Image (cartoon, helix red, strand yellow):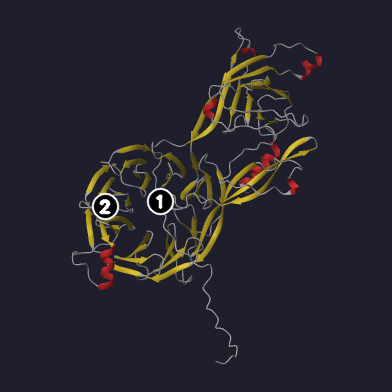
Amino acid sequence: MNPVFRKGLLLALSGWVPTVNAQEDTTPAPAPPAAAQPGDSQDGRAIYSVPSLKPQWQARAVLNRATDKLKHLTADEDVVVAQSMSGVITVLNSENGREYWSSHIGRTNDATMPAATDSQLLAVITGPTIHAFEKFTGRRLFSYRMPQSPSASPIIFRREVTYGNSTRMLRWIVVPMIDGSIVSFDVESLERMGRLGTLPDDVWRGEQWRFVISEDIRYSVLAGSSRLGFATGAGNIYSIMLSGSDAGQGRFQFIMKSGASAPPVLAVRGTDERVVSATRDGRLFCVDLNSAGRMHWGLALAAPVMKPMLAVQNDLYFVTHDGVLAKHDILSGDAGQISSGTGAVASQSESSRGELRAYGALVEANIDGLTAFAPFRIANRSTQQEVRSITLDLSRTALTFTASAADPAVPAITVLGDGRESTGLTGMTLSPDQKSATLEFTGFDADEYLYLNLGLQHPEVPVQKISDSYLAGADIRALVAPKRSASAIAAGAAEAYPPRTIRGRLSTGSRPWKVPGVASILAASEATIYCEDLSGSIIGVNRSNGSIEYSMDAADQSIRLFNDRTDRVITSTLTGQITLWAERRIQYGVTPVPIAGAFTWIVTPTAELQTDFARYHRNPEQRPLMPEVPAREPQVAAAPEDTGAGG
């Protein structure tokens, strides 16, 4: 069942409406007339915004389904590149799935590496040969046999260089080799050799430079603004100059003491470039790429990271080998935290005689979420206590709270027990200075959780969202009294103890941002990170609170691309049926409806939003321009009809 409807059912039972801001400043469509309250201008003002994946396009990239299988799948901001076992490479438009071009390279079952792209170039390796094409047209630029076989996929580095009044674009293809070296090839020189059969006069070999360390390099190198960074199986992080007179020369070696267990990730924040690498002994290191190997932070994990990590904004996401998705801050390395609400234990008596001990009272209060006092939860853990009222001191909070007097028959506050039954709210009093609110109620059973849903029960009760940090230190008072037995009440026995007030103080709490049961990361959007869980389903995890908001069974989609460029989820079957899934955020309006003197809510979808955030979250300033592709094949113009008029 979609989580939205589970929450919608909860709304119908409890009346609690958490407000979530929409991802776009778009006015939602009005709620259907059947769900609207006539004459209420506030219809649908409470909004859910829930993620959903929808197929944007499907395309087939393998020619012969009976004999051929898909081997590699890569993508950038413009194209999706599919490589088959037979050596066929197919390049598709990432927006509509139309084929740009396809070509057969290498031989069937040749060892191949996933393709690399930039704004105009595509490079792919088959066996020991590197092939370069124009990305959008498929024109082959060159095929060059390298002296060694590669150990990882290539990368393409491009840089503008100014000579006097002219600007020249330089491009290099950098490849890790199985002999433990990093080799850079100049694209312009090899393109000339592809056209004329010879290298330029001032170039005596295809290699621009070679950096040899004789260590196992199993992951692609990372290209910063002026340096390369990479991690080795021997447990080292290296930095190399990319261009200039010292191109190919090492700048630092950072010793991790354990081999790299996952592809390193480059986190770029302005001029700050950091390499984050995971090790086989379960540690993470964050190293400054542009300094002399200064370590920003290091972490010891419960299990090693074996799958690719993802850096989005200031968040670093990774999945440990025991199937736990975690979030850490890239700048500090601190673990992400989920607010567990504001809690308090009110156990101090206003009386100095210790009479409260006779009551055995222990009242716990918790505030969950960022919406102040929604819900406010009180639990009496003593079997002989009844909470009569509670007073909240709001002087430490930035809260605007107004009780509704428009309809006395409709309470502005609904109180529900753990079983969602009414607990007998009798009234709520707001102090004249609006710094405290006192609630009176009866019928609260012992050992029961009581939910006080404040501020979101009526259209005329506005509540301002506040941070838990503002609530810390706010005073709380609760009036407690012994719960009398039915026989004592029938006999008219006097109260053994009068009601007493206990008080405490609110404090904040949090827990680490972790999601168990995750196999790998697929992509990230503004508010959601999409992953594959251990059962093979595709799930959407809220980036703020770690809750699973979306789940989709995709058992037939056996190939799932790790997409660190855009927010698209790209999957494929082994037979080459590629599907690109785009995020849509479904907007739900919550409409108040009076029923038989009571008050309930109707949840209806009102609009569908499509966010463009994170489409280019890896290189937003380098977003390439994609040529226009017609939606349909161009049609041959019909010849004009012969009118029979003679000349």
Q: Residues within 10 Å of mark 2 (few under 14, many from 20)?
A: many
Name the residue at the front extreme.
Answer: 647
Mark pair 2, 1: CA separation:
20 Å
Name the residue at the bottom extreme.
Answer: 646
**Vertical position of residue 155 compared to residue 368: above or below:** below
Name the residue located 58 percent from the left edge and 41 percent from the top edge. Answer: 21
Q: Are the residues flagged by discs 2 and 1 in contact, CB closer than 8 Å?
A: no
Question: Does residue 612 appear in the picture of this structure?
Answer: yes
Q: Position of residue 581 (x, y in %)?
A: 53, 56
The quadrant in which the C terminus is found is bottom right
Q: Position of residue 635 (x, y in %)?
A: 53, 76
**Vertical position of residue 616 compared to residue 576: above or below:** above
Question: Does residue 278 appear in the picture of this structure?
Answer: no
**Vertical position of residue 487 compared to residue 319: above or below:** above
Disc sitting over residue 621 in the figure: 1
Name the residue located 37 percent from the left edge and 66 percent from the top edge. Answer: 134
Name the residue at the top extreme.
Answer: 353
User: Horizontal placement of 370 versus 71: left or right?
Assistant: right
**Amino acid type at image mark 1:** Glu
In-front residue for pair 640/215: 640
- Identify the residue under disc 2: 242
Q: Position of residue 19 (x, y in %)?
A: 61, 39
User: Horizontal placement of 410 versus 275: left or right?
Assistant: right
Q: Position of residue 128 (x, y in %)?
A: 29, 65
Q: Residues within 10 Å of mark 1 (few under 14, many from 20)?
A: few
Q: Secondary structure at mark 2?
A: loop
In-front residue for pair 234/383: 234
User: Horizontal placement of 486 versus 157: left or right?
Assistant: right
User: Horizontal placement of 353 versus 263: left or right?
Assistant: right
Name the residue located 78 percent from the left edge and 12 percent from the top edge. Answer: 493
Residue 384, image quadrant: top right
**Amino acid type at image mark 2:** Leu
